[in-house]
Amino acid sequence: MDVLEQGVGRLFTDPDADKARAFFRTKSRKLESKLMTVKDAVGKFAHDGDYLAIGGFGANRIPTAVCHELVRQGRKNMGFAGHTSTHDFQILCAGKIFNRCDIAYIIGLEARGLSPNARRYMESGDVEVCEWSNYSLSARLKAAAMGVSFVPTRNIMGTDTFKFSGAKVIQCPYTGTRYVAMPALFPDISAIHVHEADIYGNCRVRGITVSDLDLARASKRLIITAERIVHNDVIRSEPSYTVIPFYLVDAVCEVPYGSYPGNMYSEYFSDEEHLREWLKAEREPEEFKKFLDTHIYNCNDHFDYLEVNGGFAKMQQLRQKELMLLNNKR
C-alpha cells in the first residue's frame, strides 16, 4: 500500500496492534472484586511516563476525582490524549502532569472561555504536541478497539492539522482512492466515570458516550469511577445495559458526584459558579497556587473537595437543577 503523504508530528504511542494484543492476553479475566479507593487505584495503575486518556465529553461525565489524585500524587512526564478535553485538561495542566499531548480540543472550557493557566502551560515550550481533530482521535481509538493498527478515514486531508499530525495519506488497494490512515491509539492508563458499576467492573452509562466504549477497549489499564455501586444481580437482570464489561476494568471506585464540578446526565448539573472561580484564580499564578492548595493539595480526596465547595447542600441544588431541566425538556 503506497504512502502518498505524511504529517510531521511524532506518534507518542505504538500503534502495533499485535504488541497491544500480547499485553491484553496477560490481563486477568477473573470475576473478582476490583473495589478500591481512587488514591489506591491511581497509586497502583498510573505511573510517571504513562500515556493517559480521560473519558467523558466536555464537562460531561469527567472523572474529576482521578484527575485531582494524579495532581495530588505528583505524576509527571505523562502523555495525554486531548480529546474533547475541558475541565479535566485544566486540572492536569495545573499539576503539569504531561509533557506530550495529542491535541484536538484543549484549553477551552466551551462557552465558559479559555483556561489562562492551561494556555500558559501549552505556550511554555514544555509540552511536545501532535495535532489531530476530535474525529481523528475517535478514529484512532476505534482502530485500537478493533485490534488493528490503523483505520482509513476521509478527514483532515489538505489541512494544516494533517501537516502537523502523525497521520499518513494512503492509496486504497481496491479503488485507488486516497484515504488518511489514522494510527491506533492504545493508552497505558485511562479513567472513565460512569453512572453505575458492580464490584467487578461491569458498567452502565446513560446519555452520550462519544468514544468511551472504544476507549475502554483500547486502554491497557482502566480505572472506573462510578456514581453508585450496584449488586451484580442488577447488572445481570438487564445485561443489554452493560456497555463496559468487567474484563476491561482494573479498578472500580465508588465516587458519588465524581464528575463535579462537571455535570452528570440525569444526576446533577455542572457547578458554573465554581468553574468561574477556577478561571478567575488562574489569572494570577500566585493566587492560583493558593487556590490549588485549598481545592486539591489540602484535600484528602474528592469528598473533602465537595465539602470545601458547599457539601451535600450544594450537591442537592445541582441535582435539583438537572432534574428540573430534564423535566422541562419533556
Image (tube, rainbow, N blue to C red):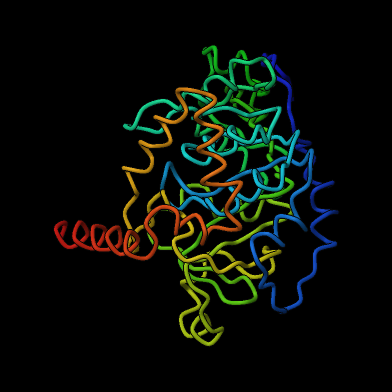
Towards the viewer: 186 or 318: 318
* Residue for point 76% across, 72% down: 29
Towards the viewer: 51 or 150: 51
Question: Where residue 235 sits: x, y (%)?
Answer: 51, 80
* Residue for point 57% across, 35% down: 137
Towards the viewer: 4 or 324: 324
Res 170 seen here: no
Question: Where residue 115 sits: x, y (%)?
Answer: 45, 27
Question: Where residue 3 sits: x, y (%)?
Answer: 72, 19
Q: Is residue 174 left or right of residue 306?
A: right
How many marks do you count on the picture?
0
Placement of the N terminus among the 4 image quadrants: top right
Q: Is residue 270 left or right of residue 39?
A: left
Towards the viewer: 58 or 181: 58
Q: Quadrant of residue 268?
A: bottom left
Query: Taking 74 as reference, is 160 above or below it?
Result: above
Question: Where residue 205 sits: x, y (%)?
Answer: 45, 63
Res 272 seen here: yes
Query: Taking 162 as reference, is 30 above or below it?
Result: below
Placement of the C terminus among the 4 image quadrants: bottom left
* Residue for point 49% across, 27% down: 107
Q: Is residue 16 left or right of residue 119?
A: right
